[in-house]
Amino acid sequence: MSGGSNFVAPGQYRHLRACMVCSVVQTQQKFIKDGCPNCEEYLNFRGQPDFVDDCTSPVFEGLITLRDPKNSWVAKWQRLDGYRKGIYAVKVSGNLPIEAADLLATHNIEYRPRDGSDVNQD
């Protein structure tokens, strides 16, 4: 995958962060430059480093590479089947700020934590 848009140089691993809403994993700079590929429409990360810091986490477990989210049983199991292909965390630690949860609610999106604490998983 070298040269691709999702390529991360080994020296940049410490800058990886996972979105607390969809669990996509990118560098902090990519979130700031391009936003979140799944949540940008609702959360507007692009160009807002403080909001990126608040709504993403450097603390996450496991990585999943999704090539075909619509047909992947792993995507369904992780609640990723409506998202874009990419790299996702299995679990993301952190607390989404109330402001971000409120933004999601205005779009009728229910925030479900991705840290394993959501007991109402499908």
Image (cartoon, rainbow, N blue to C red):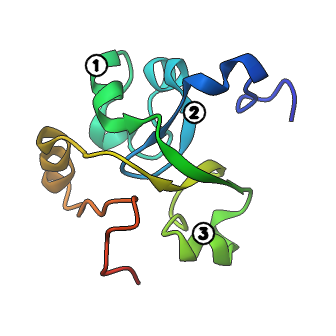
How would you rate the neighbour count of disc 3 (Cα within 10 Å): few for under 14, some for 14-19, many for 20 or more?
many
Taking 79 as reference, is 83 above or below it? above
Mark nearer the N terminus (1 vs 2): 2
Residue type of the residue flagged with mark 1: Asp
Cβ atoms at labels 2 and 3 below 8 Å apart: no
C-alpha gap between disc 1 and disc 2: 16 Å
Q: Residue at x 47, y 41 (%)?
A: 59
How would you rate the neighbour count of disc 2 (Cα within 10 Å): few for under 14, some for 14-19, many for 20 or more?
many
C-alpha gap between disc 1 and disc 3: 29 Å
Residue type of the residue flagged with mark 2: Gln
Give percent across and percent down for residue 98.
12, 44
Q: What residue sits right under mark 3 in the picture?
A: 75
Cβ atoms at labels 1 and 3 below 8 Å apart: no
Q: How many marks?
A: 3
Mark nearer the N terminus (1 vs 3): 1
79 lies left or right of 102:
right
The quadrant of the image that shows the N terminus is top right
Residue type of the residue flagged with mark 3: Ala
79 lies left or right of 111:
right
C-alpha gap between disc 2 and disc 3: 18 Å
Mark nearer the N terminus (2 vs 3): 2
The quadrant of the image that shows the C terminus is bottom left
Taking 71 as reference, is 69 above or below it? above
Q: Quadrant of residue 51?
A: top left
Q: What residue sits right under mark 1 in the picture?
A: 50
Q: Which mark is residue 26?
A: 2
Q: Quadrant of residue 43?
A: top left
Q: Secondary structure at mark 1?
A: helix
Q: Secondary structure at mark 3?
A: helix
